[in-house]
């Protein structure tokens, strides 16, 4: 999608002033129209046109006369796409400009905000032109023109999804004939243009629908099913002719440099999609042999993203406060735990984003590097060449870091190095696959970690799960009766736990139920985290020394004020963010 025109601070006020000066509107109308535009989150010109105070031609001529810039009607002007390289899509949307023509070092641009002198200077510098000639247009005309000129290859492919599938139906009979002639092309050829276009279309379509995973599921004597996982739920998207099943898998293997002749064992790799298509997307790929001599493919989309601020992560205020206290300490080890796909990496990068300051040296070892941050020194681990998490950790310690993040502590060598780093004055972050916070401690001790060293270095462990958010467009408020309220209290852990967490301070509760509409999937849209933060205490340390069971550590943490995953989830249900059904899907107790 093309980036929208920026907010243009002061634009409405200056436009209103010119129109009042020219006698087109009164001062009272100017105030009213500015108020309407602010309320509707639009620009004053949209309000003027909607109320038929001025048409676009009169509006442009009035402004042009006042500021001495020629107007241009982009609706009647054919814009060349050849100038896209002069001003790219991001710059066009950010500054609200569109290149019209370039003759020598003179560049003519259409713009809707002639008052932003700094933007004009920036464009002149970025484009390397000696003369910039602006022409005036409306926000509406400029937005439409930018969308037309910068319509990306991604959008062009996605707009033809049906055409691609139709091509498959037309080609399948030809492909079946080739199966007899050439064994290596038994089901199409992996470099056939239709197959290339199909794979690109599937990836871009999944990306546009915010899917996290793509599942390619061929059957020996039936169609190939393509499913996307969105917000944690799999949904069938399309069925492809069976004659394409091998070529489809082979094409994906070629994209991630896997052995296309090997179908007997699982393989894994990565696709850097910007080599094949218009989007900077990285995909983690796994092939799995299934019955009948065919292979399934699962592709996880690792779209480049920026870390969310900690305050936007949905932490309970108590959890956020204690987490901030611990990540501000100069040394120690902190874990973020949960199952695969529970948002551990996102949380860690939000924490690192909070700590990322010019005076702080941060090293990370990840596999893969999903989120990139300026200021972090990030290492892509590659076990195939010997660059493991443990080896990266040892190298980091020679580089005098303040903070280290290790993608996962899955073995004794890595965990031992992490504990040693924490004891020698470094703040260490990592992840682990455990069900809850107390189990993390017993899991680490079972690995063979020295309990005394671990207890001395351990700061806290944050367990988390992802649950679906209720759709704000269609969710329906539900009044709680006494029986339902008692069920919430019982699920929370009883009246004592309810009172200790001061849940009643949030009265009246805003409980909603899922409905479903065209903007969501079954009443839910997007996901959020629920959290459980266990912070070490002297009593917990003593129990680490004697290798106490997880249940004892859990009890001590709750006494210290820890909210369990389920308790945090129920609080979010009572705030109207998610539903009890979602919480009970991911929490046992």
Image: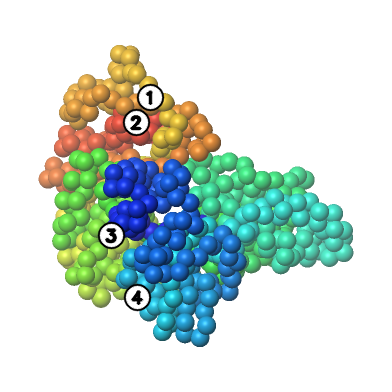
Picture coordinates of residue 165 (x, y %)?
A: 72, 51
Location of mark 1 (residue):
477
Which element is circle 2 on? loop
Q: Residue furthest left?
A: 538
- The residue located at (41%, 84%) in the rendering is 130
Location of mark 4 (residue):
121
Q: Nearer the viewer, mark 4 or mark 2?
A: 4
Sequence-first disc among 2 and 1: 1
For this rendering, which residue is in front, 309 or 408? 309
- The residue located at (70%, 50%) in the rendering is 162
- The residue located at (20%, 35%) in the rendering is 558
- The reply, left or right, for residue 540 in relation to residue 51 is left
Sequence-first disc among 3 and 4: 4
**Position of 8 relative to 313 (above/below):** below
Which disc is residue 353 wearing? Answer: 3
Distance between mark 3 and mark 1 Cα atoms = 36 Å
For this rendering, which residue is in front, 541 or 11? 11
Quadrant in the rendering for residue 525? top left
Sequence-first disc among 3 and 1: 3
């Amino acid at each position: 999608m093309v980036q929208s025109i920026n907010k243009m601070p002061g634009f409405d006020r200056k436009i209103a002033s010119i129109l009042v000066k020219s006698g087109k509107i009164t001062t009272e109308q100017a105030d009213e129209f500015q108020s309407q535009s602010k309320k509707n989150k639009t620009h004053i010109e949209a309000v003027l046109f909607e109320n038929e105070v001025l048409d676009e031609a009169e509006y442009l001529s009035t402004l042009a006369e006042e500021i001495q810039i020629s107007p241009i009607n982009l609706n009647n002007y054919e814009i060349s796409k050849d100038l896209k390289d002069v001003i790219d899509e991001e710059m066009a949307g950010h500054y609200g400009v569109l290149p019209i023509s370039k003759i020598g070092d003179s560049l003519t641009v259409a713009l809707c905000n002639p008052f932003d002198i700094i933007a004009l200077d920036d464009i002149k510098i970025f484009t390397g032109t000696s003369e910039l000639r602006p022409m005036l247009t409306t926000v509406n005309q400029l937005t439409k023109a930018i969308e037309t000129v910068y319509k990306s290859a991604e959008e062009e492919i996605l707009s033809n999804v049906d055409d691609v599938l139709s091509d498959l139906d037309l080609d399948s009979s030809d492909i079946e004939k080739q199966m007899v002639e050439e064994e290596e092309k038994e089901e199409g050829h992996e470099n056939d243009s239709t197959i290339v276009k199909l794979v690109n279309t599937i990836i871009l379509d999944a990306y546009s629908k915010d899917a996290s995973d793509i599942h390619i599921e061929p059957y020996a004597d039936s169609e190939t099913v393509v499913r996307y996982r969105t917000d944690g739920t799999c949904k069938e998207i399309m069925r492809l002719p069976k004659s394409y099943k091998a070529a489809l898998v082979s094409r994906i293997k070629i994209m991630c440099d896997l052995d296309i002749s090997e179908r007997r064992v699982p393989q894994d790799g990565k696709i850097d999609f910007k080599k094949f298509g218009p989007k900077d997307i990285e995909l983690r790929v796994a092939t799995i042999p299934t019955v009948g001599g065919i292979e399934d493919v699962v592709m996880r989309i690792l779209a480049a993203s920026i870390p969310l601020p900690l305050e936007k992560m949905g932490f309970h205020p108590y959890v956020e406060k204690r987490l901030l206290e611990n990540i501000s300490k100069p040394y120690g080890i902190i874990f973020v735990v949960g199952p695969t796909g529970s948002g551990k990496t996102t949380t860690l990068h939000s924490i690192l984003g909070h700590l990322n300051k010019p005076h702080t040296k941060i090293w990370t070892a990840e596999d893969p590097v999903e989120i990139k941050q300026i200021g972090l020194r990030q290492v892509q681990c590659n076990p195939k060449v010997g660059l493991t998490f443990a080896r990266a950790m040892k190298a980091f310690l020679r580089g005098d870091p303040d903070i280290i993040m290790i993608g996962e502590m899955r073995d004794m060598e890595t965990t031992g190095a992490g504990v040693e780093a924490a004891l020698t004055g470094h703040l260490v972050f990592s992840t682990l696959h455990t069900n809850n916070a107390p189990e993390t401690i017993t899991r680490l001790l079972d690995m063979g970690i020295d309990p005394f060293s671990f207890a001395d270095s351990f700061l806290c462990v944050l367990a988390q799960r992802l649950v679906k958010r209720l759709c704000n467009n269609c969710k329906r408020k539900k009044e709680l009766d006494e029986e339902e309220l008692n069920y919430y209290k019982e699920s929370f852990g009883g009246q004592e736990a309810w009172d200790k967490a001061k849940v009643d301070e949030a009265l009246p509760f805003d409980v909603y139920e899922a409905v479903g509409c065209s903007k969501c999937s079954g009443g839910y849209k997007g996901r959020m985290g629920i959290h459980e933060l266990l912070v070490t205490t002297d009593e917990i340390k003593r129990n680490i020394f004697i290798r106490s069971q997880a249940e004892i550590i859990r009890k001590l943490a709750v006494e210290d004020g820890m909210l369990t995953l389920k308790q945090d989830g129920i609080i979010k249900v009572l705030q109207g963010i998610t539903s009890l059904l979602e919480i009970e899907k991911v929490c046992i107790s």
